[in-house]
Image (cartoon, grey):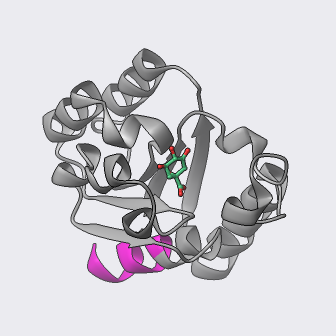
Amino acid sequence: MKILVINGPCINMLGIREPEIYGTEGYQELLDLIERTAEEEGLDIECFQSNHEGAIVDKIQEAYGRFDGIVINPAAYTHTSIAILDALKAVAIPAVEVHISDVDSREDFRRISYAGMACEKRIAGQGIDGYRQALLYLKESL
Ligand code: DQA
């Protein structure tokens, strides 16, 4: 089973950015957790991170016919990007939305999720473990 993990802007700065909100573990630790989960669960996983909306749209389009599932944390684009929503709808690959923080208990503008409208599940507020949970969910459901 092939899963694409997509992270949006500033997820590469985990551990540095607002550690009181996003924790002290860095992006490399997130990649290590995903790799460990892939090995344990027998999943074939590719990780992609970009600060650019169009690059994320391109990556979602390229996933068509190549991946069975998508785990996506669009970061700030969650709350603004109809382009990412449309790309997820276009490829119609089962997707799970992940947020490290509990977006619903933060500013009002974080309660809107465009990307989430094309995702079958949302995991938020679980720290980086949310990615492991999303992978387990996709493995079970696909
Ligand atoms: C985030 C939440 C977003 O509101 C924020 O813009 C991010 C990260 C999260 O993982 O908690 O960059 O997606």
Q: How many marks?
A: 0
Is 35 left, or right, of 80 in this rendering? right
Is 135 left, or right, of 142 in this rendering? right
Is 71 left, or right, of 108 in this rendering? right
Q: Residue at x 76, y 50 (%)?
A: 14
Q: What x and y, as percent, mark residue 66? A: 37, 40
Quarter placement of the C terminus: bottom left
- Judged from this view, the residue extending furthest toward the top is 54
Q: Residue at x 28, y 38 (%)?
A: 65
**What secondary structure is the stretch in magenta mostly built from?**
helix
- 103 shown above or below 46: below
- 9 shown above or below 16: above
Q: What x and y, as percent, mark residue 9? A: 58, 33
Quarter placement of the N terminus: bottom left
Residue 1 appears in the picture as rendered: no
Q: What x and y, as percent, mark residue 108? A: 33, 53
Q: What x and y, as percent, mark residue 122? A: 33, 68
Q: Is residue 90 magenta?
A: no
Q: Residue at x 36, y 33 (%)?
A: 60
Q: Residue at x 27, y 78 (%)?
A: 141
Q: Which residues fall within the magenta stretch?
A: 134-142
Residue 70 appears in the picture as rendered: yes
Is 23 left, or right, of 98 in this rendering? right
